[in-house]
Image (cartoon, rainbow, N blue to C red):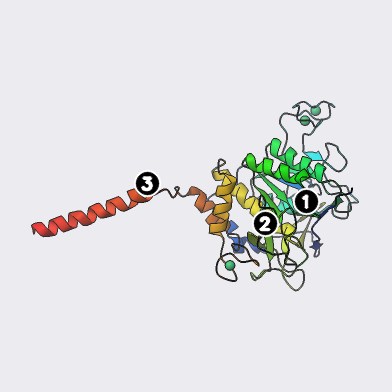
Amino acid sequence: MIFLIISTEQGLVCPIYASDYEDAWHHAIIHSDDAWKITQGRKEIVVAVIDSGVDFSHPDLISAGWINAGEIESNFIDDDGNGYIDDVFGWDFVSNDSAPGPTIDDPVNWHATFIAGIIAAPKDNFGIVGVAPNVTIMNVRILNADNMFYSFEVFGNAIRYAAENGADVINLSVTLSDNSSLYMDDIEYANSLNIPVVAASGNNGLSVISYPAKSDNVISVGATSSWGETADFSNYGEELELVAPVGNSEDDDNIISIVPPDLYSGGWGTSFAAPQVAATIAMMKSLNDSLSVAEIRDILHKSAKDLGDPGRDILTGYGLLNVLKAVQAVLLPPEDSSYQFLAIFPILAVITIIVVKKRKS
Ligand SMILES: [Ca+2]
Ligand SMILES: [Ca+2]
Ligand SMILES: [Ca+2]
Ligand SMILES: [Ca+2]
């Protein structure tokens, strides 16, 4: 039996040779630029991009790539004993080798690189800035030159590879033809290690969320236009949790990111909403890497800006991603009852003193 995995349909607008931070309008909407005053992410925090293969030779991504410190390059030995020979820079699950970059004639060779730029392009007065500029990207290739893959089991292996080799959050800007324990068990395994899994809702413009985003174990992210309405292409439904700004496919500004070999471009698709949430989780974990998946989801839900119908709704979930509020929430003391009692107690004491003094006079 053939299982089909296909990345969400998406488009590039018009590749250009330079881009400025000012073109990246999404930062003002999700308040990532305000969050950078608190943290720009830590290098030790790793976002796994399981996708078409990231091109780290792009000048606006150099040095953002994960390196497997336990592995020695090109000695044909699995030095760290993780089951993958010479996997210094990640793993290519398409050609089953240690070179996970995109192939040059690959028509979608830009997809993973575009996602990596949205997450972690450095804040260096050159080109664009990612939502979490200082974090690290783990490169795991799963999509072939036709933007497809044919085995749920190998997809599951890619998730397990990321989870077992130090990913702090996993981004899946792919949609699958069906649910299957062949990869869902591996997503549950990642969650059991405190690793959240984020996925794109899909680009069919339908009231059905695509797998894997549809699963309870995955944080489901849809896209909005630049003016904050659900994008025409963005799948929606009761499982949708958050939305992030990408732009509509037509007649709108599109999110700007990097494209091989050294270009910038606008792009559309829920593929580019999910990595904004994955990057936000990396920012949160940069402040506290012991947060549980449940705590992270709770903070993301409560810090989102409510859109559309009041409260959670099928078109926008809990609302629009807010990076600043999510990061601030990590720094707040826990809301336990003893803390609230201590906060109220001094106020009661002050009132009592005033009453006593008045009676004396
Ligand atoms: Ca190895
Ligand atoms: Ca080796
Ligand atoms: Ca830059
Ligand atoms: Ca709402």
Q: Looking at the picture, tell me which residue is in the foreground, 163 or 57.
A: 163
Mark nearer the N terminus (3 vs 1): 1
Task: Report the side of 154 relative to 232 (left or right).
Answer: right
Residue type marked 1? Ala
Residue type marked 2? Ser
Marks 3,1: beta carbons within 8 A: no
What residue is disc 2 on? 220
- Residue 35 shows in the view: no
Task: Report the side of 344 relative to 302 (left or right).
Answer: left
Mark nearer the N terminus (1 vs 2): 1
What residue is disc 3 on? 338
- Indicate if the residue with disc 3 has its beta carbon within 8 Å of ligand 4: no
In the image, residue 19 sits, relative to residue 135, either above or below, namely: below
Q: At 78% across and 44% down in the image, what residue appears? A: 182
| Element assignment for label 2 | strand
| Element assignment for label 3 | helix
What is the distance, in whole Å, between disc 3 and disc 1 at their CAs?
46 Å
What residue is disc 1 on? 112
Residue type marked 3? Ser
